[in-house]
Image: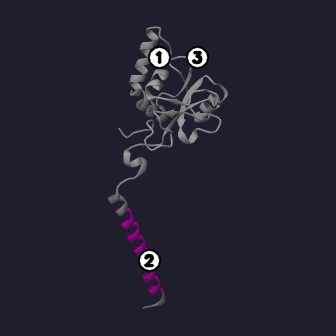
Amino acid sequence: MTHAMTHWARLSSARSARWTSLALTLALATLAGPRGAAASGEGEAIAVIVHPDNPLTRVSLTELRAILLRQKDRWPNGAPIRILNWEANSPTRVAFDQAVLRMSPERVAAYWVDRRIRGLGTPPRSVSSAQLIEGVVARNTEFISYVPAREAGPRVKALIVGGLRPGDPLYPIRPTSE
């Protein structure tokens, strides 16, 4: 066997071993099943945020739903509650509405059309970025909104929802695979 053939055989053997190792790793990962967020069909938590000076620190899902549907429109100090939503079909908005309001985008739209027709109010304003939402909430104590937990910076306060913080694995506001 020539030197070139020996070198090629060793190189081919090393590649084969790497592919075998990769295939074995993938097979074991598949057998072990998904872990973490993927295992439960859930994604990253969505934090509910307010201004740091807002006295609210915790809220139940029921209270949060009433706020977002404008059934509760005043903070305990009497100031109006101002809501910022994400754009209607953004993944964050769809996940949030499903988790908190238990409504599809179509159902949410129909809810607000009905409220308008009855003279019971208009939907919250919609914006398209976490940075914009965080900036508005950080400058005004009357606002409440939501952002992916990783986007909730130090200029805002993430609320405890249903007794759980956004970092808790059982935190109730996150996308699901349903």
Mark 1: secondary structure:
loop
| Range drawn in magenta | 4-27
Task: Count residues near mark 1 (Cα–Cα under 10 Å), then give few for <14, some for 14-19, many for 20+.
Answer: few
The extreme left residue here reads 31
User: Which residue has dot 2 on it?
Assistant: 14
At horizontal 58% and vertical 38% (from top left) the residue drawn is 152
Q: Which mark is residue 80?
A: 3
Residue at point 49%, 35% (across, down)? 92
Please tell me whether mark 1 or mark 2 is closer to you in this view.
1
| Numbered disc 3: secondary structure | loop
Q: Nearer the viewer, residue 32 or 15?
A: 32
Q: Which mark is residue 38?
A: none
Question: Residue placed farthest to the bottom in the image?
Answer: 1
Residue type highlighted by circle 1? Gln
Q: Amino acid at mark 3?
A: Pro
Which of the marked residues, 2 or 3, is nearer the chain's N terminus?
A: 2
Q: Position of residue 91 (x, y in %)?
A: 47, 35
Specify few, some or many for label 3: CA neighbours under 10 Å numbering under 14, 14-19, or 20 or more: some
Contact, mark 2 vs mark 3 (Cβ under 8 Å): no
Along the polypeptide, which appears first: circle 3 or circle 1?
A: 1
Alpha carbon separation for disc pair 3 and 1:
12 Å
Q: Quadrant of residue 77?
A: top right
* Quarter of the view holding residue 104: top left
Return the x and y of residue 124 as percentages of the image width and height: 53, 21
Q: CA distance from mark 2 to mark 3?
A: 68 Å
